Amino acid sequence: MRRLKALTKLPLKCIPVCTLIAFTIFSFVVIHSSAKEFYDVVILNGRVIDPESNLDVVRNLGISNGTIKAISSSKLEGRTTIDARGLVVSPGFIDLHQHGQNEENYRYKVMDGVTTAFELEVGTGDVDRWYAERAGKAAINYGVSAGHLAARMAVMHDPPTFLPTGEAARRAATDAEIEEMKRLLEKGLQRGAVAVGFGIQYVPNASHWEILEMFRVAARYGASCHVHMRNAGLREPASSVQALEEVIADAAITGAPLHVVHIASTGGPATPKLLQMIAEARSRGIDVTTECYPYIAGMTEIKSAIFNEGWQDVFGIDYKDLQWAATGERLTKETFDNYRKVGGYVAVFSMTEDIVEGALKNPLTMIASDGILENGKGHPRTAGTYTRVLGKYVREQGSITLMDALRKMTLMPAQRLEKRVPSMKNKGRIRIGADADITIFDSQHVIDKSTYKEPAQYATGIRYVLVNGVTVVSDGQLQSQVFPGRPVRAPF
Ligand SMILES: [Zn+2]
């Protein structure tokens, strides 16, 4: 009050006219903006589901600078308005297991609702180069592990194939080679690799000691070990039960967190037993998690060690249960022998619907795709994993609730990584301050369209996807030339 009096006492001619005008405009702007915040994007009247807080109500979201700024039941205004009436507004899906990491694959991922895709099983041998190759060119967020396979292939001078086909696939390592692999993993972790990746079944002569040594490196950096286990199926010796004992022991000995990849395709009929073992290990305080995908077939490289002598007994299948990805044909002994010389992807029908549904229903499993498409060829899981869970298993079969399905796609994968990668605390959640990675879908119509014969089919029902606040899918249509994806990396 006293100050106001002082101001009014000033002779008017002492204040230049332009200052007066500026003051008037300034006070108008301040009053206006404090009365009503104006956001970059608002998402109105959607059914907002957040598995961390268990929120499941109609709300409006306000987004600015790539961040969720408001979650409100009152009307919000923004430069862009998305009408989400009748749609579910969820945290964007996080895929911990996506091999295909290029423009082609990211298009199918985002149309399946994925906003962050990690390559953590196979990983890379050159972390800096891997991130540099994607910078500014990615529709979704991306991240990678330091890969034991890559380290082994480098040390043994293998040809630069995706999975080992040279000496790394065939022989044991010397102590000096194990030391060199440890050095390579350590270098990757020092450059911000998100985790450490393993494909032990692809390098069957890697000793138990070699794998344990790699876990020791991971433990020093608090990095989770994402493991494709040494053996599949139930047949003893060399069962998946024994394989899980190996890596749970490694986690217990070293303290490294363990994440078992595609538990159903490795476990087959042993899957319920493996899930029981993981639950028991967790109850003893060992940090073990796992993932699965909603398909009864896996897919891998026909030249890999998985198809070494005796594969039929391991998986309990025969040639007819293999489907050649390039043509869709089922194999015979003759065509198998031919293709094994040439190389390429083959679908392996080794699971049943009961195995897949049992794994999905288990509260321990996250959803992860194991996807890769190359020029439109590959496994339907690349383009359909998340919409298939939402359409077939949530809506049609009622196998799990929508909230539980979304938890397995968002919060759980974020939590798996957030100790080493603190930025993951701002993903997988609809929370003020969280990254605006948001997937908006029609729960009544969402479904996968990709098949084994035609894997490169966009899913339907994903209506809008925002990545760091930028719209990548709008009204069900992929927006071209939009690359808001950012690297997800551990501090380095
Ligand atoms: Zn695998």
Image (cartoon, rainbow, N blue to C red):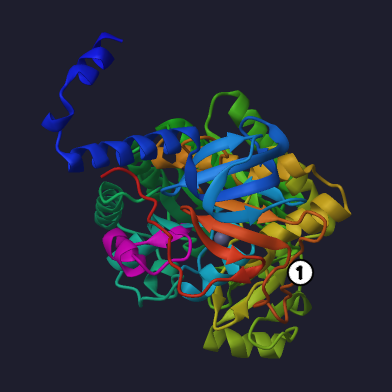
Of residue 126 and residue 473, the one placed in the foreground of this image is 473
Q: Looking at this rendering, what residue extends furthest in the left direction?
A: 14
Q: How many marks?
A: 1
Which residues lie in the magenta part? 120-141
Residue 111 versus residue 258 in the image, above or below: below
Q: Looking at the image, which is closer to me, 320 or 124? A: 124
Q: Is mark 1 within 8 Å of ligand 1?
A: no
Q: Classify residue 331 as left or right of residue 228.
A: right
Q: Position of residue 469 (x, y in %)?
A: 48, 53
Q: Nearer the viewer, residue 428 or 227?
A: 428
Amino acid of disc 1? Ile
Magenta segment includes 151: no
Residue 366 visible in image: no
Across and down, in percent, residue 291 comes to 62, 48
Q: Nearer the viewer, residue 102 or 431?
A: 431
For disc 1, the marked residue is 317
